[in-house]
Image (tube, rainbow, N blue to C red):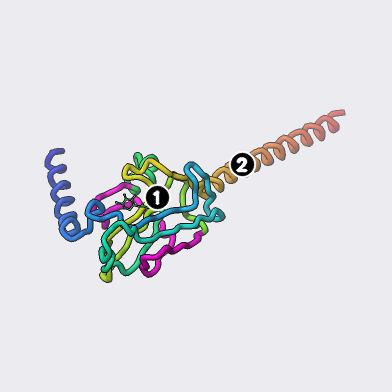
Amino acid sequence: MASGWFLLAASILLLSGLPETCYGVTFSSLQRTLVLSASPTPGQVLKAGEGKMTVTWSYNQTFPTGTDSTYKSVTVKLCFAPVSQVDRKWRKTADDLAKDKTCQFKVVSGPYTPDSFSSTWTIENDVPTATYFVRAYAYDSDGAEVAYGQTTDAHKTQNLFEIKGITGRHASIDVASACFSAFSIASLVCFFYIEKRKEKMSQQK
Ligand SMILES: *[C@@H]1O[C@H](CO)[C@@H](O)[C@H](O)[C@H]1NC(C)=O
């Protein structure tokens, strides 16, 4: 029975995944022709909503001229490092870029130019606490990925930085205020109790 369900699930997965695996661009097929750098230093902690970073990209001139002839636009994205993907399938890396969830936050996008281009971005409020790197994709006129560049090595372990999300800070404030309210209610109850006792005692005299 269980294996029957498994087979059914597997075939549904296979069928629904088939069109994408046929036509999707895979990350492994892309050349790393963009030189990308970002201002955060390794291990730096930036705060969502206030931290800023500057990204700079250009074409790596060691590749033959013309390699970038189909590049039309560039989008720079903030990507989860492997350490922040563990046990989180909603951040999982897939070679098929249509399914890849590594890079979920757009930093900047613009027309492609082989010359160096810089842009500064304030980290948005909804970026969660995690370890990140930055990746840039070049797209052709059909909007398909044709090349990339990233601020880390192929194993995504070097030159990583941290972002501290707002929700984490809010949660701790919420906990603190909840504790505080519980404490105020408790003291109020105590206060009434003592007052009532005093009243009773003075009536008994
Ligand atoms: C440019 O590409 C070459 C070949 O892949 C590589 O060895 C070199 O490090 C790259 N340059 C930069 C600045 O990333």
- Measured in 3D between alpha carbons, the distance from the residue under mark 1 to the one under mark 2, in whole angstroms, is 38 Å
In the image, 127 versus 53, the foreground residue is 53
Image-quadrant location for residue 36: bottom left
In which quadrant of the rendered image does the C terminus lie? Answer: top right
Disc assigned to residue 105: none
Instruction: Determine whether the residue tagged by mark 2 lies in a helix, strand or loop.
Output: helix
In which quadrant of the rendered image does the N terminus lie? Answer: top left
Sequence-wise first label, 1 or 2: 1
User: Mark 1 near ligand 1 (CB under 8 Å)?
Assistant: no
In the image, 25 versus 69, the foreground residue is 69
Q: Tell me the magenta residue range.
A: 92-121
Q: What residue type is labelled 2?
A: Ala
User: Mark 2 near ligand 1 (CB under 8 Å)?
Assistant: no
Question: What x and y, as percent, mark residue 83?
Answer: 38, 40
Within-10-Å neighbours for mark 2: few <14, some 14–19, many 20+ = few
Verify whether residue 116 appears in magenta: yes
Question: What x and y, as percent, mark residue 4?
Answer: 12, 42
In the image, 40 versus 97, the foreground residue is 40
Q: In the image, 204: left or right of 188?
A: right
Within-10-Å neighbours for mark 1: few <14, some 14–19, many 20+ = many
Which mark is nearer the camera, 1 or 2?
1
Residue beneath disc 1? 151
Residue beneath disc 2? 176
